[in-house]
Image (cartoon, rainbow, N blue to C red):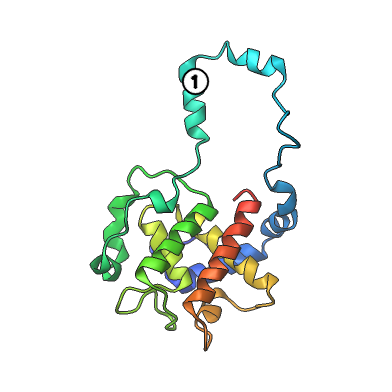
């Protein structure tokens, strides 16, 4: 199933479950410790002499372009602010223009923006609602809103949800994200902690 251009939180939840159960995803999860960025063995390590000499023959413009491509996405804390409280209750489709010219982001970066949505606009756990009357989002709703605000594609939102599900499965939860989000007694602090843990897991996997 392919996510539509305007999926609901429940649709995202169900598609993320299918992605999580796929053999490709399970292989990724099983191999994530090996995909973490290696740490240098010591400060004395340096590139072989031949490597830096080879760079002398590369045009400066090409070096700058390559460096720009490898720059990390901006930290959500340094990004432009979210629309205000009125913006929180407006339909997300009104923010489609914010996607123009945006580059793709990793799921870990996408989840960092989703965390900002939950912190600034609030978290809610009403069944089958993306947001409440104050504009607060559920976990899957925050992922979709983040996409609609211009941070990551629908595929990124799906992968972010799959990382949330991976974290929940590791904690023994066998249902979808939505039922976890709206379980009696669930708190905003727990939702943010789950999102932080899933984001850390994704980062270690290079996502």
Q: Does residue 151 appear anywhere in the picture?
A: no
Residue 195: give x, y in percent of width and height. Answer: 54, 66
Q: Residue 13: horizontal and vertical position, in percent?
A: 52, 70
**In the rendered view, does 2 fall on the left or right side of 49?**
left
Q: Is 47 in front, or is 15?
A: 47
The quadrant holding residue 90 is: bottom left
In-front residue for pair 157/114: 114
Measuring 71% from the left and 41% from the top, which residue is drawn there? 39
In the image, residue 10 lies at what x, y percent? 48, 74
Can residue 26 be seen at all in this image of the molecule? yes
Where is residue 125 shown, x and y percent of the image?
A: 45, 81
| Residue identifier under label 1 | 62
Q: Is residue 196 above or below residue 35?
A: below
Q: Quadrant of residue 85?
A: bottom left
Left or right of 206? Residue 12 is left
Q: Give above or below for 83 relative to 165.
A: above
Q: Residue at x 54, y 54 (%)?
A: 108
Residue that protrudes farthest toward the left in the picture: 86
Q: Residue at x 59, y 16 (%)?
A: 55
166 with respect to 112 (left or right): right
């Amino acid at each position: 199933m392919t996510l539509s251009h305007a999926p609901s939180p429940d649709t995202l939840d169900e598609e993320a479950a299918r992605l999580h159960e796929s053999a490709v995803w399970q292989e990724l999860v099983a191999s994530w410790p090996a995909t973490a960025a290696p740490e240098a063995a010591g400060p004395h390590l340096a590139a072989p002499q031949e490597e830096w000499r080879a760079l002398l023959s590369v045009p400066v413009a090409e070096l700058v372009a390559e460096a720009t491509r490898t720059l990390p996405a901006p930290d959500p804390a340094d990004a432009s602010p979210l629309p205000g409280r009125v913006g929180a209750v407006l339909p997300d489709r009104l923010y489609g223009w914010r996607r123009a010219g945006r580059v793709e982001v990793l799921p870990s970066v996408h989840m960092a923006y989703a965390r900002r949505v939950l912190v600034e606009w609030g978290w809610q756990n009403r069944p089958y609602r993306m947001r409440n009357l104050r504009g607060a989002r559920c976990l899957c709703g925050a992922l979709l809103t983040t996409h609609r605000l211009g941070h990551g594609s629908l595929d990124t939102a799906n992968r972010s949800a799959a990382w949330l599900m991976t974290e929940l499965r590791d904690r023994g939860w066998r249902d979808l994200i939505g039922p976890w989000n709206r379980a009696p007694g669930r708190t905003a602090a727990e939702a943010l902690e789950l999102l932080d843990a899933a984001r850390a897991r994704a980062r270690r996997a290079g996502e």
